[in-house]
Each structure stands twice: as structure tokens, then as C-alpha cells.
Image (cartoon, grey):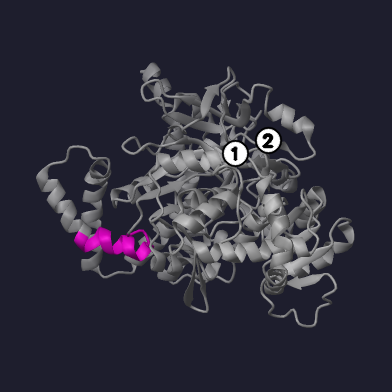
């Protein structure tokens, strides 16, 4: 291993951590990838050689210190190596969302001024070629998968393996320059630039230093006792800060192994084969897995279903207490052990969670029923609260203090305070350096003392010291009568139902709340199949009378729940409609991390919002959509608008009596 860092054993960069791992964990697996159905593996020693060859190849191609290198593609070891190789030569990696459309990609590439692009396959290469005339600083593109690339003009195109070969061939000549560049890296060097999801406007480039990432990786790894023997599955977008901290930050700090699935379609199979010990997923993944489990049990025989229901009822009763080390009777423990043998163990293995020691979810609130389901199985699922500007971690849940309605206590090294208006602020070693080329937004977000405004409203529970997040601060408003309006609070309750995929609640400044709802095609489609109900499209199923009745029952159940909270009881939904299309990032309605773009949705569907408030029983609408191949089209529908029963507020009822 010749890729060295001459600072006195200071682990102040990822190339320095790589050198340490290649020395300490030389024969341990660092990366695995499933290709053509077979798992390929690279040790830390082999990984260091791969990265060194690529770094030398980049220098050979003329990469300069301070250049930006865009990286686009699915999770693959080669692309993770690209990020560390870029750092080693003094360049700055900028991972992009692989499903970004041409306009989104063009903005990021132009904004960061990327001279080089490393792309995973022909699809990503084609996207860049389509927009290259608008990219004034773009010079060269390196592609990983040569399939379909033989007849392309290779004036500015280079195969990944060829770049490595040329770097290795010039090893003697270029190694001194590589050493010189890696020796200059320190805690203040830029580690990576990650773009925000852009819920309210153009994405911002978040500049994160080595200090941000390494200190955060160190603190969070120690918090959960992560170690070199752990295994993770890398399947989330590489452009997301969470993937970077898990698959590079914590991986390089602890020396654990990063496993890349063959494709999104095989992810669940690959998850079962790897059986990770450390796992992260957004609530949507856990919801989908639970929905699929329940669908399978609906199709199971009566005896099998009865056994499942019996032991799951017991698991909900005592499982979380056993997991947290609390007192549980010997009889209950014995029965739980039997359930582990007959139900819980096989189910966890089927889900791929048989070896999970630490699991996390974040990004959105997860339903208490869903959260408790996994913990009742003995899976140590926890919640964290974070954002890109914090290098992920703001709060975490300590073992033994895990609850579904809080996001835990401040992570190690993080300070959190609540402003008078309820907004959450933090500062930590992970606090970002700046927004690239955007001093105004940097100053608005981070004050001179390092406190960062999260944009979220929340409070600390006096009894536990745990943080509770209410909603986005900008979305928290008032109804016409002055009562509190917190749309996400209601939307999350609606999304707890497997039949509801997405919800958007309106009501700021209005006399009542209304909602758009997307059905979950998998869950509702399975119901239709079991009941011999034929449908030809999402639109047809979404408008089926029985589906509307079911969604109405869910809305009214949420209203009864919301009515129990005196502070937010005004957020009950009076009218709703089921949208004729799924909200889609390609249509600009969601971000690439599937966050709702509330303002854009309100403007795009202004006619539907108007109909919700003017008493119309139905409305005809035409909506432009983007197909998978990029073509535009229109879908037309007449949507039924339904009134939902509003529950009496508990305190008002008592007062009246």
C-alpha cells in the first residue's frame, strides 16, 4: 500500500483512514457487490490499490486540486472509490441523484462547475451528453459499465478501467505528486459537496469538511458501538448525506463492510442474503415491508394465520420491554422464546433482519404501530433526527430509551436549543462550512456563533429530555380562527395506514382543513385482487367507490385521533379527494428524497384545491405528466370530493357537560 498520509498518524482525511484500514484490516472485506447473481468481494488492501490506481489515473488526465468531480449512478464500490480517489487528488466529489432529470442534472453540474463526470452506465452518460453544450466547464466523462458504449465518440469519454490502467502504468512517475496532494489534506479540507433536496427552490450545495464528516462518523459510531465486523447494505441514493455517512464516513472510521445490491429490483433478496448487522431505511421502506408481510398473511392458511396473530399479539405486549432489558415475567419470556422459534425468527430472516443489532429510521415520522411492530420482533429499531447541514446526526435514541413519538437526545458533540418561536437550532462538529456560492443563504441559516436553524418546530419533553418534532416551522401556521395548523402532523397520521402512500393537507388561513391523498397501489391492488375487482390503471382503482369508502374511514379515524390533541384539534380534515395520479419527483411534485413540494403542488392543482373549499361534489381536471422515457402527456379525470365526519374535541365535550 503506497497511498500515504504524511501527517503524524493524524486521521484527518478519508485517504488517511483508508491507509490505516489497509494496514489494520488488510484481509477483512471492505466492499461487496452482487453482479450476475454472484457476490464479488474486495478487502481493505485491495480497495486501497483500486483507489490508488484511479487517483493516479485522474492526475494523469489532468485533474487539478480544487476541481469538482460529479459522480452519478447506483450504489457500486467503484463509485464509492471514485469519491475517495477524488479526495486523494485534492478534488471535491459531488454525487448526484441517478434518477435526476436533465434539467436538475444540468443545474447541479453547472452550479458546481464540474470539469469531470464519473458515470455508472450508458443511461447516465446519455443524460450528460444531452446537456453538455450548456456545461461550459465540463471536459471529460469516465464511465464504469462499457455496455452499449462501443460506438460513442470517445474524444471526451474514457472507460473507468482504462483510467485505472493508465494510472497504474504511470505509477512511478505520478506517485510523488499523489503523495504531495494527500499530504496537504487536513480537517479543514473540503470532503464532499452534497446538494439539498430543494423543497422550496433550487437545491443548494452544502460544503462539508473532513472535520464535519470524520468527527460525526466517530461520535455516531461510538454511540452505537459499531465495529469492524459489522455489515451494512448500501442501497440509498449516493447523493444523500445519509448514504455518505454510513457507506463512507462510518465505514472508513470503523472498518466495517459495505455491501452493494445488484439492482433496486433485487434489493430485498440481497438484503436477506447479506443479513446486515447495521441497517438504515426511511419509514417508507419499513412500511412497504410490513404491508407485504400482512398481504402474505392474508393469503396464508387459517392455522398459520391464527398462530401468527396469537404470537404477534404477545410480541406487542412484551417484545419492546424484553428488547429494552425491562422486567418481564418468566412465563412471558418463555412464551416469547417459543414465538421467536415459530414466528419472529423466521419472519426476521425473511425480511433480512435476522442479524440487525442496530437499525435506524429517519427523514419522516414513522407510524407508532409500524415502529412498535419491528421492535416487538426484537429488532433494535431507533429514530434519529438530522439533516445534510449537520452531516446527518442532530439527535439519536439511546438504547433503552427508544420511543415512537420522540427523536431522542442530542447526539454526542451536538448542542440543541429551542427558539422562542419553537424552531430547533443546533451546533456541532458536523455543522456545514457553507452553501456553495450562496453567502446570503449561509448567513440566514448559520449565525456567527455556529448555531444552525433547522426550519423545524419542536420541543424537549421536560420529563425525559427527548426532542419531539412537530412540523416544518414554515408550514406551521394558523387557521382562520387562530388555531394551530401543522399539516405534517396530520399527513403522517394518514400515512400510517398501508392503503395511503402520500397525503397533502391544506388549511393555512382557512376555516377548515382539506387533503389530497395518494393510494398505495401495492396494498390497494392486493385488496382488489383478493376481492376479484378488476382495474386497468392507478386512476381507475383510485376512483373505485369501495376504495373511496375505505380512505374515508381512514380520514375519519385520523380526525378522531387529532381531536384528542387540544392544541392541534383544528387540523381535522373536513373534505378530501383521492388524486388521479401518484405525486412524482419527475413532475416536480416531490423532491428526489420524496419530500412534498407543498407550494408547487398547491399551484399545480389550484383547481382541485379550489373545489375542496367551494363545496363542489366533483371536479374535472387535466394534468400534465412525465413518462419514464421523458415524454410529456396529459391525463384527464373527474374526481369525487368527499366530506369527512369531524370528531368533537375532547376538552370541549367535557366543558359542555
145 shown above or below 462: below
Q: In this view, does 325 lie to the left or right of 466?
A: left
Q: Residue at image x 37%, y 20%?
A: 654
302 shown above or below 410: below
Residue farthest along the left direction in this orientation: 331
Pinpoint residue 353: horizontal percent, then vertical percent: 36, 58
Residue 212 image label: 1
Q: Can residue 207 be seen from the camera position used here?
A: yes
Q: Residues within 10 Å of mark 2 (few under 14, many from 20)?
A: some
Tags 1 and 2 touching, CB below 8 Å: yes
Residue 342 located within the stretch drawn in magenta: yes
User: Pointer 2: what residue?
Assistant: 433
Q: What stretch is highlighted in magenta?
A: 341-354
Look at the image and tell me in which quarter the N terminus lies: bottom right
Please tell me whether the stretch drawn in magenta is mainly helix, strand or loop: helix
Q: Is residue 324 left or right of residue 293?
A: left
Q: In which quarter of the image is residue 89?
A: bottom right
Pinpoint residue 645: horizontal percent, then vertical percent: 48, 39
In this orientation, which residue lies closer to the viewer: 395 or 298?
A: 395
Q: Can residue 195 be seen from the camera position used here?
A: no
Q: Is residue 374 left or right of residue 253?
A: left
In this orientation, which residue lies closer to the viewer: 415 or 140?
A: 140
In this orientation, which residue lies closer to the viewer: 387 or 593?
A: 387
Residue farthest along the bottom direction in this orientation: 151
Pinpoint residue 95: horizontal percent, then vertical percent: 67, 55
529 shown above or below 467: below
**CA distance separating discs 1 and 2:** 8 Å
Pinpoint residue 604: horizontal percent, then vertical percent: 74, 48
Classify mark 2: helix, strand or loop. Answer: loop
Q: Residue at image x 51%, y 59%?
A: 234
Q: Is residue 58 left or right of residue 20?
A: right
Residue 573 located within the stretch drawn in magenta: no
Amino acid at each position: 500500500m503506497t497511498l500515504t498520509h504524511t501527517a503524524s498518524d493524524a486521521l484527518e482525511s478519508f485517504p488517511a483512514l483508508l491507509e490505516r484500514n489497509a494496514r489494520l484490516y488488510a484481509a477483512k472485506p471492505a466492499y461487496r457487490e452482487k453482479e450476475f447473481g454472484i457476490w464479488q468481494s474486495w478487502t481493505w488492501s485491495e480497495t486501497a490499490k483500486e483507489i490508488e490506481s484511479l487517483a493516479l489515473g485522474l492526475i494523469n488526465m489532468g485533474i487539478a486540486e480544487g476541481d469538482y468531480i460529479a459522480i452519478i449512478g447506483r450504489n457500486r464500490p467503484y463509485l464509492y472509490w471514485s469519491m475517495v480517489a477524488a479526495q486523494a487528488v485534492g478534488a471535491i466529489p459531488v454525487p448526484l441523484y441517478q434518477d435526476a432529470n436533465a434539467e436538475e442534472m444540468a443545474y447541479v453540474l453547472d452550479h458546481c462547475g464540474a470539469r469531470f463526470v464519473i458515470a455508472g452506465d450508458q443511461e447516465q452518460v446519455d443524460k450528460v451528453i444531452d446537456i453538455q453544450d450548456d456545461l461550459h466547464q465540463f471536459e471529460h466523462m469516465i464511465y464504469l459499465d462499457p455496455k452499449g458504449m462501443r460506438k460513442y465518440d470517445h474524444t471526451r469519454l474514457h472507460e473507468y478501467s482504462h483510467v485505472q490502467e493508465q494510472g497504474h502504468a504511470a505509477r512511478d512517475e505520478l506517485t510523488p505528486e499523489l503523495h504531495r496532494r494527500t499530504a496537504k489534506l487536513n480537517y479543514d479540507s473540503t470532503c464532499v459537496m452534497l446538494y439539498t433536496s430543494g423543497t422550496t427552490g433550487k437545491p443548494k450545495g452544502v460544503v462539508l469538511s473532513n472535520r464535519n464528516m470524520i468527527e460525526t462518523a466517530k461520535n455516531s459510531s461510538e454511540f452505537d458501538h459499531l465495529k469492524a465486523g459489522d455489515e451494512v447494505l448500501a442501497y440509498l441514493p449516493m447523493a444523500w448525506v445519509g448514504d455518505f455517512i454510513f457507506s463512507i464516513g462510518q465505514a472508513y472510521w470503523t472498518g466495517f463492510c459495505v455491501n452493494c445490491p445488484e439492482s433496486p429490483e433485487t434489493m430485498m433478496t440481497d438484503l436477506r442474503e447479506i443479513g446486515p448487522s447495521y441497517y438504515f431505511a426511511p419509514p417508507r421502506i419499513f412500511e412497504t415491508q410490513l404491508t407485504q408481510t400482512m398481504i402474505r398473511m392474508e393469503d396464508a392458511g387459517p392455522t398459520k394465520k391464527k398462530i401468527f396473530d396469537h404470537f404477534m399479539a404477545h410480541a406487542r405486549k412484551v417484545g419492546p420491554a424484553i428488547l429494552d432489558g425491562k422486567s418481564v415475567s418468566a412465563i412471558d419470556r418463555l412464551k416469547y422464546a417459543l414465538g421467536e422459534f415459530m414466528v419472529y425468527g423466521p419472519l426476521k430472516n425473511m425480511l433480512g433482519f435476522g442479524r440487525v443489532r442496530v437499525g435506524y429510521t429517519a427523514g419522516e415520522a414513522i407510524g407508532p404501530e409500524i415502529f412498535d411492530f419491528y421492535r416487538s420482533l426484537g429488532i433494535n429499531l431507533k429514530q434519529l433526527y438530522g439533516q445534510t447541514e449537520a452531516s446527518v446526526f442532530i439527535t439519536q435514541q439511546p438504547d433503552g430509551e427508544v420511543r415512537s413519538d420522540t427523536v431522542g437526545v442530542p447526539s454526542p458533540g451536538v448542542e440543541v436549543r429551542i427558539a422562542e418561536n419553537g424552531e430547533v437550532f443546533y451546533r456541532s462538529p458536523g455543522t456545514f462550512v457553507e452553501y456553495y456560492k450562496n453567502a446570503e443563504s449561509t448567513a440566514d441559516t448559520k449565525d456567527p456563533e455556529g448555531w444552525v436553524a433547522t426550519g423545524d418546530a419542536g420541543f424537549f419533553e421536560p420529563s425525559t429530555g427527548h426532542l419531539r418534532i412537530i412540523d416544518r416551522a414554515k408550514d406551521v401556521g394558523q387557521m382562520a380562527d387562530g388555531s394551530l395548523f401543522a399539516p405534517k402532523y396530520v399527513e403522517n397520521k394518514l400515512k400510517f395506514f398501508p392503503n395511503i402512500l402520500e397525503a397533502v393537507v391544506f388549511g393555512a388561513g382557512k376555516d377548515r382543513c382539506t387533503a389530497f391523498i395518494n393510494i398505495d397501489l401495492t396494498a390497494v391492488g392486493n385488496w382488489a385482487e383478493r376481492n376479484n375487482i378488476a382495474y386497468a390503471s392507478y386512476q381507475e382503482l383510485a376512483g373505485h367507490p369501495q376504495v373511496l369508502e375505505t380512505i374515508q374511514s381512514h380520514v375519519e379515524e385520523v380526525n378522531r385521533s387529532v381531536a384528542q390533541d387540544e392544541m392541534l384539534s383544528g387540523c381535522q380534515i373536513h373534505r378530501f379527494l383521492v388524486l388521479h395520479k401518484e405525486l412524482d419527483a419527475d413532475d416536480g411534485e416531490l423532491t428526489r428524497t420524496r419530500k412534498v413540494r407543498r407550494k408547487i403542488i398547491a399551484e399545480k392543482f389550484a383547481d382541485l384545491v379550489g373545489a375542496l373549499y367551494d363545496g363542489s361534489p366533483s371536479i374535472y381536471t387535466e394534468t400534465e405528466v412525465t413518462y419514464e422515457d421523458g415524454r410529456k402527456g396529459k391525463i384527464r379525470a373527474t374526481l369525487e370530493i368527499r366530506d369527512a365526519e369531524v370528531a368533537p374535541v375532547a376538552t370541549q365535550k367535557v366543558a359542555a357537560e
